[in-house]
Amino acid sequence: MMTTAKEVKTVNFKFDANQPYQLDAIRAVVDLFKGQPGNRGGFEILFSETIGGDT
């Protein structure tokens, strides 16, 4: 069965980025990319501010 654009559902994540466990989770994901070269292809991740005040 094919899915059409009208049938696609979206998922929204809501969280309070100031909760300690949320900050830990955010840092864990960011740490995955530390030391990796920037990708200049079709997909790029840009970090423009520090979350939580310390890194």
Image (tube, helix red, strand yellow):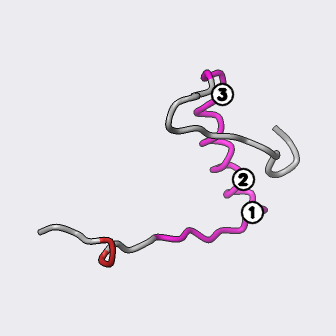
Q: Secondary structure at mark 3?
A: loop
The answer to whether the residues at label 2 and label 1 have Cβ atoms under 8 Å apart is yes
Which label's residue is closer to the chain start, 2 or 3? Answer: 2
Q: Residue at x 66, y 49 (%)?
A: 26
38 versus 18 height, above or below = above
Q: Nearer the viewer, mark 2 or mark 3?
A: 3
Q: Secondary structure at mark 2?
A: helix
In this rendering, position of residue 50 left or right of residue 13: right
Q: Say if the magenta span includes residue 18.
A: yes
Q: Position of residue 3 (x, y in %)?
A: 22, 69
Please give the residue where the numbered disc 2 appears in the rendered image: 23
Q: Nearer the viewer, mark 1 or mark 3?
A: 3
Q: Nearer the viewer, residue 31 or 8?
A: 8
Question: Mark number for residue 34?
Answer: 3
How much space separates mark 2 and mark 1, taking CA atoms? Answer: 6 Å
41 versus 23 height, above or below = above
Which label's residue is closer to the chain start, 1 or 3? Answer: 1
Q: Quadrant of residue 29?
A: top right
50 versus 39 height, above or below = below
Q: Nearer the viewer, residue 43 or 15?
A: 43
Q: Which image quarter is the C terminus in?
A: top right
Question: Mark number for residue 19?
Answer: 1
Q: Position of residue 25 (x, y in %)?
A: 63, 50
- Amino acid type indicated by mark 3: Lys
| Residue found at the very far left of the displayed protein | 1
Q: Which image quarter is the N terminus in?
A: bottom left
The answer to whether the residues at label 1 and label 3 have Cβ atoms under 8 Å apart is no
Magenta span: 11-37
Q: Position of residue 41 (x, y in %)?
A: 52, 30
Neighbourhood count class around disc 2 (C-alpha, 10 Å): few under 14, some 14–19, many 20 upward: some
- Amino acid type indicated by mark 1: Gln
- Amino acid type indicated by mark 2: Leu
